[in-house]
Image: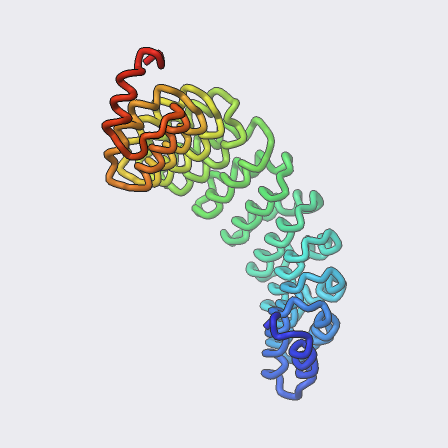
Amino acid sequence: MARIGQEAVNRLVRVLNDRNWKVRMNAAWALGYTGDREAVAPLIRLLNDPAQQVRYFAVESLGKIKDPSAIGALIPVLRDENWKVQMNAAWALGQMKHPQAVEALLDVLRDNNPTVRYYAAEALGNIKDSRAVTPLISLLKDTNYNVRMNAVSALGKIGDTRAASYLIDALKDNYFGVRYYAVEALGNIKDEQVIEPLMGALKDSNWKLRLRAVTALRRNLRVERVLESLIGMLKDGHWKVRLNSVLVLRNANDSRIVMPLISLLKDDNDYVRYNAIDALIKIKDLRAIEPLVAVLHDKNQQVRLQAVKALEELTQQRFGLSFEKWQKWFEDNRKDLGL
């Protein structure tokens, strides 16, 4: 639609005055995909349309266009008589990420409809204004688990240390989604008190939460106990957790990671083996040469090619995929390499 041109936008704007509400609704919907700011004022006029479906798509399109001039008009829509329109207004304001909407969104956190509260919390997380921290903390006690989940997520996006202890408590929530986003949120908060709870999450029975905990601890690789725990995660029972651990640990550039990475060259998963090699390239430890030569027999061609790349980086030699030539070179130079 955006490629059709200004004439198409003008036609759609004219159709917004059609007597048939379905025609107005479809025109409002289509204008959102044009991204044209000329549509903002006509769409704002539709916010008072008698048909809730028209108001719904007018709000949605304003959120897609993201013109801040619409904020003042959208704020009253947070109190629309229809909860779906309210919900979309909260979403649209969140897309604009402007602090002008914060106070109105905070008020909507007390709305009777959980879906409206859900989107208001999400919007406040997108805006990242510290005024929302305390109200969002209160929302962690909401009876609706989806609302609690979005409150946790929003607090993580804001990253205020005042939320740390409350997010730690959220790790005990009965709903997995809340616990999952609590782990993610804690990873965005720079406070030492979050480290131990996140390390505890590495032992969770759910692999998705363990994976998220690995990512959340990425900023604390210089903390000794964190590094040791993440090295241990290279033996996790789920390949995605092992893979994520490799991706995080390759930034540590610590020699203690080398042997655990070498062990992963025999991992059952192609992605794990490939990325273990990539991490070894970054660390550049000569102990990896002989195990990498063995990888030239790997069943996966991409893994073999990555091994060649690693060997060339480590040795400055060029023998391609020839196992025999690499093996001979290694045996001839083992002593000089200190191996």
Residue at the spot 74% in from the left edge and 66% down from the top edge = 73
Q: Position of residue 113 (x, y in %)?
A: 58, 62
Query: According to the image, what is the colour scheme of the structure?
Result: rainbow
In the rendered image, the vertical position of residue 334 relative to residue 123, given as above or below: above
Q: Position of residue 337 (x, y in %)?
A: 35, 14
Left or right, residue 2 beside residue 43: left
Residue at the spot 38% in from the left edge and 23% down from the top edge = 315
Q: Position of residue 279 (x, y in %)?
A: 41, 31
Residue at the spot 46% in from the left edge and 39% down from the top edge = 172
* Front-most of residues 310 and 275: 310
* Front-most of residues 100 and 16: 16
In the rendered image, the vertical position of residue 119 relative to residue 36, given as above or below: above
The picture quadrant where one finds residue 123 is bottom right
Q: Quadrant of the C terminus?
A: top left
The picture quadrant where one finds residue 259 is top left
The picture quadrant where one finds residue 26 is bottom right
In the rendered image, the vertical position of residue 268 relative to residue 338, given as above or below: below
Left or right, residue 8 beside residue 325: right
Residue at the spot 73% in from the left edge and 51% down from the top edge = 99
Left or right, residue 171 beside residue 58: left
Q: Position of residue 87 (x, y in %)?
A: 60, 63
Q: Quadrant of the N terminus?
A: bottom right
* Front-most of residues 269 and 29: 269
